[in-house]
Amino acid sequence: MSKIVFPENIGVTEYGTVRLGKDYIADGNDRTRRARIRFQTHAHRDHTSGWLKNIRPGRALVTSKPTIELLGLDYPNVHKNGNIVPLLHNQEIESKGLISSKFQMDWEIENSDISLFDANHMVGSSQVLVKNRATGVTSLYSGDIGWPLETIPNADVLILDSTYSKLDTSDDKNWNRQDAVDRLLQLISSNLSVKPIYIYARFGIMQEIIVKILENIDSEINFVGSDEIISKTNIISTYLSSSPTKIINEKEKYNFNNVIHLKEFHKKQNESLNGLNITISNFNPQNNAPDRESSDGDYINVLLALTNHASGEDLANYIQSVNPKYIITDSARNASNANKLADQIMNKFKILSIPSSLSSVWKD
Ligand SMILES: [Zn+2]
């Protein structure tokens, strides 16, 4: 299998940057400085390392409008200083002409048609497609994908997220995503007026949960959050069907009932607060229920599986729809899943698959 030659300049580097051709990267910086066209699939931190370098002169950053708004929270001058191309989902543009001619000097950009497609992972999240007219190769980076997806493009090479990736859903798993949402709403309704509620979640899924709460629970609810959660929610909510009228800043003094504290996922590790603590996790706690509960005096902890990563049958359907000749799974963000997933794909679909640690660009 190591003798099979995958198309050149496509894969993932050990520092997590995705390559989709000589001139194209996604989600990270290019240490070789070759790539002129740079994509950002979404604003989660495990995908944004060194992103500011992608708006330097002579480069173009192609991304969705919500993603650039979220990145702009870290760097308010982003529009003033960067060559940013906000692309609508399903819109196709030519790469030629994205870089001003004064930066072209004596090298040319490969001419490709490039597009972003909705990835249903969080607001603005995108799959990236590059159809290279020079080499004839079409490459697709899934980014983080949720399910279902409106558009799944065909491609010769697929670079696949392996954050939470199993092709077989466990046979004894007898609940689905809606059961997890129902459990969440039930936990909130029965505790809201009785004790403080804390929700620990990554952004994206957090705002999706806020919408579910607003649209399904009839009581007056007071949301409390940090500066960061408030500013992110203000941006994300403009793209969703419901938004809280106000989120109270956790630094303010307040004395309300029916309080839900919105907390950053990573803060869960060192916090233990009296009340109901709900942690939204990507992983299945067990097979017979979407949640696992434990309590210690006034402290109740619930781990709830509510993921925005496609897995199981959905992931298998995704691969079949893309119908690629080659698949490269992302080892930079999850090495052991990438190995397992590449093996599973070879076995199930007989499509040539390698983890990106074996791709030609790993050491770039
Ligand atoms: Zn993500």
Image (cartoon, rainbow, N blue to C red):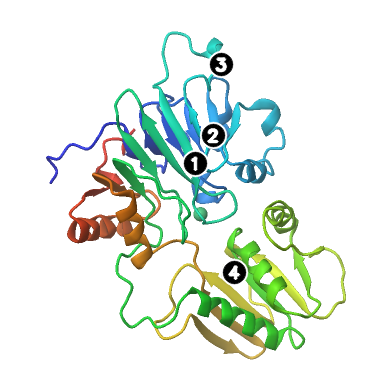
Residue 347 is left or right of residue 50, and the answer is: left
Mark 4 or mark 2, which is nearer the start of the sequence?
2
Can you identify the residue that label 4 sits on?
A: 268
- Give the residue type at disc 2: Val
Front-lying residue, 236 or 266: 236
Mark-to-mark CA distance, 1 and 2: 9 Å
Question: What residue is drawn where x is 18% and y is 36%?
Answer: 5
Front-lying residue, 266 or 221: 221
Mark-to-mark CA distance, 1 and 4: 34 Å
> Pointers 1 and 4 in contact (CB under 8 A)?
no
Mark-to-mark CA distance, 3 and 1: 22 Å
- Give the residue type at disc 3: Ser
Question: What residue is drawn where x is 46% and y is 56%?
Answer: 149
Can you identify the residue that label 2 sits on?
A: 62
Mark 4 or mark 3, which is nearer the start of the sequence?
3
Mark-to-mark CA distance, 3 and 4: 46 Å
Placement of 228 over or under 14, stated as above or below: below
Q: Position of residue 80 (x, y in %)?
A: 70, 27
